Amino acid sequence: MYAIINSPWVRPVILVAALILVWDLSIRIFGIPAYLIPTPLDVGNQLYTQWPMLAAETLPTLQATVGGFVLSVVIGVPLAMLIAYSRTIESYLYPLLVFSQSIPKVAIAPLFVVWFGFGILPKIIVAFLLGFFPIVVSTVMGFKSLEADLIDLARSMGSTRLKMFYKISLPNALPAIFSAMKVSITLAVVGAVVGEFVGSNSGIGYVLQRANGNFDLPLMFSALIVLSMMGVFLFVLIDLAEKLVLPWHISNRGDALAPT
């Protein structure tokens, strides 16, 4: 029984159950009205009755999220490699990338709707803009963290630049790349919803906007729960991919943090 309770899959369930209990007790003890915070039972009922609609509206958001995330990786990783290996490119691009992050994406999202219409493309672009920066920054640090002694050793053994990249540089940077991907996927979810807020007639962002306009708090909470579940699911997928690709890394060894 003790082993089951301490399972890494059971602990989050226990924590969520405790938070729901605190949520329900707080409403009952302090007499919080339903138009401010709905009860867990109301949210559960809404989640059950509206599940077919919420599941259908999740698909556009999921498509925009995955599209923006994939675009972030496909563009961000090669760009980070150029920045890491060229000081000239770094001096030109890195300050511009940092500057671009100071621009609120909510402010420029309407421009994408004007330019590209109300389809999925504006949502993908906003998701890409939010998830792109962590990929670049972490990947640059991953490639730059390679020890000079290791490079000198590989060169002394006659290794070519291409072989050094695949055998040394890339494996050294992969943990940082996967860490960046975990951050990027959660930000891509936010970006997709922001794009749906600005202009859309589908998606979880549209459901949230409609529920807010109708003061339907149970539906709003239900949509937020579905959105959180989607983010957790995507995060877990990347975490599993990391464990498959990097079984040798210390963070993926079960005994790495075990007490001695």
Image (cartoon, helix red, strand yellow):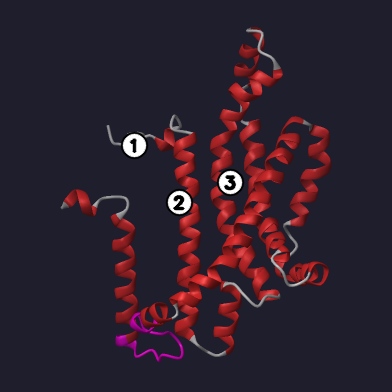
Whole-percent x and y of residue 166?
Answer: 62, 24
Residue under numbered circle 1: 254
Q: Which residue is mark 3?
A: 180
Horizontally, residue 49 falls left or right of residue 188, namely: left
Mark 2: which amino acid? Answer: Val
Question: Picture quarter containing residue 214?
Answer: bottom right
Q: CA distance from mark 2 to mark 1?
A: 17 Å
Q: Kindly state the secondary structure of the residue where label 1 is placed.
A: loop
Which stretch did the figure color magenta? 28-43
**Circle 2 sits on which residue?**
236
Q: Earlier along the polypeptide chain: callout 3 or callout 2?
A: 3
Q: Is residue 32 magenta?
A: yes
Q: Nearer the viewer, mark 3 or mark 2?
A: 2
State how far apart marks 1 and 3 are (Cα).
22 Å
Location of the C terminus by quadrant is top left
Mark 3: amino acid:
Ala
User: SS at mark 3?
Assistant: helix
In this view, the residue in front, 104 or 220, is 220
